[in-house]
Image (cartoon, rainbow, N blue to C red):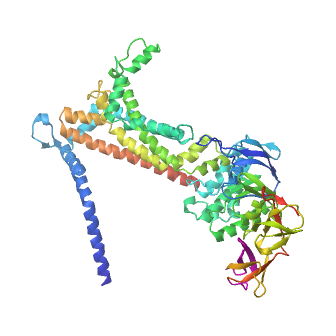
Amino acid sequence: MAQIELIHVSKTYGPTKHGRNAEPAVCDLSYVIEDGHFVSLLGPSGCGKSTTLNMIAGLEDISSGTILIDSHRVDDLDPDKRDLAFVFQDYALYPHMSVYENIAFGLRMRKVPKSEIETRVTDAARRLEIEQTLQSKPKKLSGGQRQRVALARAIARRPSVFLFDEPLSNLDALLRDQTRSELKLLHRELGATSVYVTHDQEEAMTLSDRIAVMSRGRLEQFGTPYEVYHEPATEFVASFVGKPRMNLFTVTKAEIGRYGLPGTTFTIDIGDIGMDQVRVGLRPEECDLHPADDGAPGHGVVKAVEPLGNVSDVLVTVGDQIFMSRVPGFGNYTVGDHVNINVTRARIHCFDQKSGTRVDH
Amino acid sequence: MAGTLVEKSRKRDLRFGLMLTAPSVIIILMLLGYPMGYAIFMSFHQWNDKLGADHQFIGLNNYGQLITDPAVWAAMERTAYFSVITVVGGVALAVIIAILLNRKFRGRTLARVLLLVPWAVPPVVNGIMWKLIFDGSVGIVNTILRSLGLIKENIQWLADPTAAMNILIFAETWKLLPFLCLLMLAALQGIPESIYRAAAIDGADAWNTFWRITLPNIRGPLMFALIVQSMWSLKVFDTIYVLSGGSGGPVSGTTTINFLDYITTFSNLDRGYGSAMAVGIMLLVLIVSAFWIFVFGGFSRKRREANG
C-alpha cells in the first residue's frame, strides 16, 4: 500500500540546441496521492503529464523537489526499487518472449520462486482472460490482447503502485470503453494506488478518485471529478474538461449585478464582484434555448444544429461569439431561427481575465 | 472461355517475367556459373601448367591429395585461428561498440561518422598502412615502444610468423569492424526504447538486460553478421597479399587456406589441384554458414521448449 507525495517537483531538460535554457517540462508540482486512490493526470499533449509519471516511476530524474512514497524519499531509487508497475502506451511487451515469459520476467528478475511465479502468472492471466495466449508471442496477438498482457504483467508483480501511461489510446473506440470499465473493476478489486496519464477527459472522469489537470507543465487543479467539473479552478480546466466544451466569453458590467455581452441584448446575473470585465463560463447542457417572440431579434441566431440522437447541440451566433447549447432530443430549431438563451439553471463560472483563476461570486 | 483467358494472361505474365530476369540470369551464369563449372571440371583433372597441356582425367585424386596434404592442414589451422578471432572477436567487439554508439552522448554523430573511416579506406591501402606502421625499421610502433622504454631494439614484427599473423588479424579487424558495427547499430536501433524502460521497471540489471533483452532482439542481424564475416574471414586475401608482399609469409605464417590456394594456382600453376582446393573452400564456407544457422535455429528451438 502506498501514498505518493510530490513536493515542489520540477523537471527541466538541458539547454536546447540554440543554447537557451528550455522551459521547464514540469514546474513546481505539489500534491498528495492517497493510498488506494486512482488519480488521473489529465492534460493536452506536451503538458508534462507523462514526464510526471516517468518521474514517479524513476524513468526520468527530477530536476528539483522531492517524491515520497509512503514517506520515504524515492528520488534516488532505481525504478525497480520503488515497488511499482508500469503499463506503457505501446505496451512495451518483450517481442522475443512468449506471453507467459513476458508476465513472468519481472518476477524472475526479483528471484520469486518458480512455483510462486507460475501461480501468479496463471492468476493474472485468468483475471484478464488471456490464458489461451500464454504460449504465443506478442506479435501473434491483437491490440486488445497485447493490452491485456501488459496489464497482466503489471498485476502479476503485485506492486503497491500502478502507473498507466495512456494505456487505452491504441485501442479502437469500442474496446477502449470496455477496457476502461474493466480497469475500474480491477482497481476496485486490487485496491492499489494508481496513477493514470490520459488526455481524454472522459477517461479521467470515469476512472478517477482525483484528477490532476495539467497545462504547460503546471498543475491547474487537483480535485475530485465533481470539483474539476463543477468548480474548475482555472479557465483552462473549465475549457478542457467537459464535452461539449464550455461556453467561455468576456462580459462587461452593464448595471448593478448584471453583466452583458457587448453588442448584444444577452445579459447574466453574476452579482457584485467588483470587476468591470470578467470571463464567464457556461456549460452547454445547462443553457436552455427559447424561440424569440415574433419579429424580435432575440439574443442570437441559430447557426447550426448537430443532432446526436438523445440530444442536439445547437450553435447560436450571439454578437461575434458562438454560443453552444445542448437541447434534448432533436430540438425544434432550424438554421436562421432567432432564439433567446436562458441561463437560470446554469452554474455561472467566473474567471479573472488576466490570470484565468476562478472568481467566486 | 474465361479459364483460357486467365491461362493466357498468366502465361504472358510468366513470359514477361522471364524476359525481365533474363539479362541478370545470363550475366550471373557467365560471371559465376561458368568459372565455377570450369573449376569443378578442372578439379577432376591433372591440370598443371608446368607439366604441359596434357590434362588427364584423374577422378578424385586431387581431392584425395587435399585431405592428406600437410600444407593444407597447416593452412587450415591458421585459417581456423584467424577466423575464430576475427569472426567471434570481431562481431563481439562490434556489438560492444554499437551499444556504446547507441547511447546518447555529446559528439555521437561525429563518432558514428568516424567509425566509418576505416571502411572507406581501400583494403590494399589498409594493408599498406599497417605494414608501414609495423615496419621493422621505420614503423611508428617501434618508435613509440622505444620512446616509452618498453623495448631496446627494433622488433621485426612482420618477420615473425606468429606476430605477422596477429598483425594480420589486427589489420583485418580494423577493416571489418565498421560494417559489423553499422549492422549491429541498425539492429539495436530497431529495438523499441520502451522495452528497455519496461525492463528497468521489471528490475533487470545491465547484465540481464543485455542477455535477456538486447541479445535475443538482435538475433537475426547477429546471425547475418556471423555468416558474412565467416565467409570473409575464410576467404581473406588482399590484406595477406599486401602485408606479406604476396608470399603468405614469413615461413607461411600468414598463409590461410585461401592464400594457399592462390599460391598453388598462380605461383605453382597447379590449376587442377588449386581448383579442388577452391571447391573445398566453397564447401567449407557452406558448412560454416550452415553451422551458424543451426546454432541460431537450435537456440530458438531450445527457448521455445524452455517456455513450453
Residue drawn at point x = 39 percent, y = 41 percent: B229
Residue B95, percent from left and from top: 49, 40
Left or right of B241, for residue A277: right
Horizontal relation, residue A355 to residue B2: left or right = right
Q: Which residues are magenta?
A: A306-334
The residue at the point 30 percent across, 84 percent down is B1
* Image quadrant where residue B307 sits: bottom right
- Whole-percent x and y of residue B258? 29, 37
| Rendered location of residue A8, percent (x, y) | 78, 45
Q: Where B120 falls versus B156 (above or below)?
A: below
Name the dominant secondary structure of the magenta segment: strand
Quadrant housing residue B248: top left
Picture coordinates of residue A23, whole percent (x, y): 68, 46
Please count the marks in the image. Answer: 0
Q: Is residue A85 magenta-colored?
A: no
Quadrant (top left, top right, bottom left, bottom right) of the C terminus of chain B: bottom right
Q: Nearer the viewer, residue B113 or A39?
A: B113
The relative height of residue A351 versus residue B140 in the rendered view (above or below) is below
